Image (cartoon, helix red, strand yellow):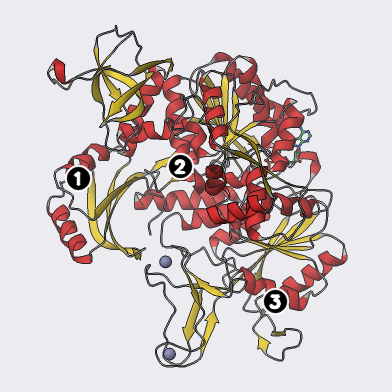
Amino acid sequence: MFNSGTVVKVLIPNVVNTGYDYRLTGDADLGQFVRVSVMNRPYIGVVFGFGDSGLPPDKIKNVAEIYPSKLSADDLLWIQKMSAWTLMTPGAVLRLIINVPDAFLPPKIEPLYNFNFAATGKMTDARQMVMDAYSANDNTAMTITDLRNIARVSHAVINTMIKRGLLTLCDNRIIESNEFNYIYHDTGNVILNDEQSGAARVIGDAIDVGGFSVHLLDGITGSGKTQVYFDSVLRAYNAGKSVLLMMPEIALTAQFMTRFQKRFGAPPVVWHSNLTAARRREIWRGVLNKKIRIVVGTRSALFLPWQDLGLIVIDEEHDTSYKQEDMGNYHARDMAILRAKIAGFPIVLASATPSLETLNNVDLGKYKILKLTSRFGGAQMPIISTLDMRENRPTDYKLPNDDTSHHGNLSPALCDAIADTLNAKQQVMLFINRRGFAPITQCKKCGWVAMCPECSVGMTYHKRLNKLLCHMCGRTMELPKKCPECGGEVSQFGVGLERIEQEVSARFPNARTALVSSDTIMTRQTLERLVAKMENGEIDIVIGTQILAKGHHFPNLTLVGVVDADMGLYGTDFRAGEHTFQQLFQVAGRAGRGKFPGRVLLQTYQPDNPVLTAICKCDRDSFIKNDMESRRSAKMPPFGQLIAVIVEGEKEQTLKSFCETLAASAPKLNGGKIMGPIAAQIYQIRNWYRMRFLIAGDANAKLQPVVSHWLSTVRTPANIRIKIDVNPQNFM
Ligand code: ADP
Ligand code: ZN
Ligand code: ZN
């Protein structure tokens, strides 16, 4: 406790901040939320310790307001440790926590609009996006700011919708409802089988006993991991604790919500990036005052102001979406484990394809493993086999009313399997992890390739848009009719989703198909409509990217065809094999989850590749063993550590000379080395040039302090940005 009049350090949510001194005007605890003014702007901050600036007393301003709530001492320690690990400033970490700007202010008076579902008229893209924004928020009224942020439509579009009566004014202020007063209990609708209840018991005991422990819930796809961790969530909740359930954004489906409600008797409070400002504030405050004790959310839910957190569950723990990469680099799984360790409570990681980092911690005895080895209800794992494309050459095909022959990408064997499945009135999924029609647009005569003018990547042709699209920055361009260099003929090379859709429509003209990628699925609501159509049997063949690989349970889906199983095998980073394995294994896991057995066909030119043979045998362990060994000998994570330093500059020359300065001042490392600078694989993004350093060290080397000291010795010029990425997942 700090008494009134004490000079304290207040940490504010700002990337450059490590705390400023203020004088208390009342008593406050460590971690207490306070309002202070910095350069005449109000900030919510937290009391972070005694003041230490040494400023004369008359230069020290008073704290403007002391709020009744606070972060715990554990939370403050977590902020410090997270900052030391990620090399984000403590202020940058606090900004992740205080990310609801007016959390402590009375609601602003702003007009609120409802969506007029009764209105008739054309369904435009904008209208669809606005509708989706409403359903992402259970149709609560929205401000214009909300609509712009969530539906991403312009003010002009909103005004037109108001004029046409599609949006109706309902109130002039934001009303904070009490709709999150859910009470949960075990409805008893689910009875765990032996294997499931064995796993649930171990976690339940850990919750009862308390203290830090990590449990890997390692169950094959369809084994019922969800019901096991639901059991744990209830256990902690009934003990009066708060519980966080983290999952990737695309797994937050209606299917999941329904299951939750069935088991808990009330719907979950959901946290994601598309909530209205009022909802964010309401959930944030609800968590702070413990009115809300269970939240299901994406990685940012970890930063809610949790009180008395007693359990974190991380579903699909291997998922790359837990790594945040733009506003500070952190791995939500690792930071969650850090939080559990500091506060002393159990954490559950669930996956059918755990990361090597996690499996290594199991080997080291740091994490406990709980296995679910069979599919619930006796469903069998699908039969997985390769199709050797050297012997199974796709035939050409023609489109209706057009005499041109097109090269096929679906082999005769795969086409036969599709036909059989359709005849049996079952569903097919074709997986290809590339958006658009074709990745390369090239001149046949001089070799010119369509490149993004601002990024050093090729532009992908999207047939639906009939445009070239840069997957890096989103810029679009018209497809040139002729080569801009020599006037020669341009054509598209390579295979994307839309090219497969074209082939499917030619070969199976009567099948009802659907495309699923981030181009067609802008929101979770669109995905939900698709999931519903799949469940209702309104789709025969679904063609999709990895969005489809996770979480969904389609009982009538019995055939999965992987169009190009070789695509991910030769990625340039050391996790390429692991990621390909995880992705293909997850996709394969979609087949045959109901009454009917499933099969999976992998089209490949290298059927003997160890990643593919391991998948065919469902032999995860031998794949992991091999991959672990090669990482061990290369001293790659988890057997070594990496930190990437990415330096970006508007001017190539300034960037190069700054990198030379950095290189010249690079320290010698004990148990490690600093490599670079090299030009990044994607040398230019949005016109900024990019160079990279990579710091590699032994598993137990303390790299962070060295890197942080190194970078602090050099003055960063204007127009240069430095990003530090501890344990990078992305090497581009
Ligand atoms: P996983 O997450 O391991 O892939 P799910 O949790 O999706 O598996 O379970 C697969 C299916 O089996 C789901 O439809 C789920 O509701 C059902 N299921 C699993 N365990 C049980 C149980 N004990 N009682 C009833 N249904 C269950
Ligand atoms: Zn040309
Ligand atoms: Zn671009």
Do the residues bearing badges 1 and 2 touch, measured as CB atoms within 8 Å?
no
**Residue ID at (72%, 46%):** 116
Q: Distance between the residues labelled 3 and 1?
A: 53 Å
**Which amino acid does the dot numbered 2 rest on?**
Glu
Q: Position of residue 558 (x, y in %)?
A: 78, 57
**Outermost residue toward the front?**
163
Question: Which is more toward the observer, 579 or 288?
Answer: 288
Question: What residue did someone put label 2 on?
Answer: 357
**Percent position (x, y) of residue 48?**
30, 20
Q: Which mark is residue 711?
A: 1
Q: Is residue 322 above or below residue 408?
A: above
Closest to the observer: 320 or 292?
A: 292
Does residue 349 appear in this view? no
Q: What x and y, as percent, mark residue 19?
A: 26, 27
- In the image, which disc is placed on residue 503? 3
583 to the left or right of 60? right
Residue type indicated by callout 1? Leu
Tell me the crowding category of disc 2: few under 14, some 14 to 19, or many 20 or more residues within 10 angstroms, Cα based: some
Q: Residue at x 58, y 63 (%)?
A: 433
Using the rendered view, name the quadrant where residue 234 is placed: top right
Q: Nearer the viewer, residue 364 or 184?
A: 184
Across the whole image, how many numbered discs are drawn on residues? 3
Q: What element carries label 1?
A: helix
Considering only vertical position in the picture, is 285 above or below 424? Answer: above
The three-letter amino acid code for the residue at tag 3 is: Glu
Screen quadrant of the N terminus? top left
Query: How many C-alpha atoms fall within 10 Å of the one at disc 3: few (<14), some, or many (≥20)?
Result: many
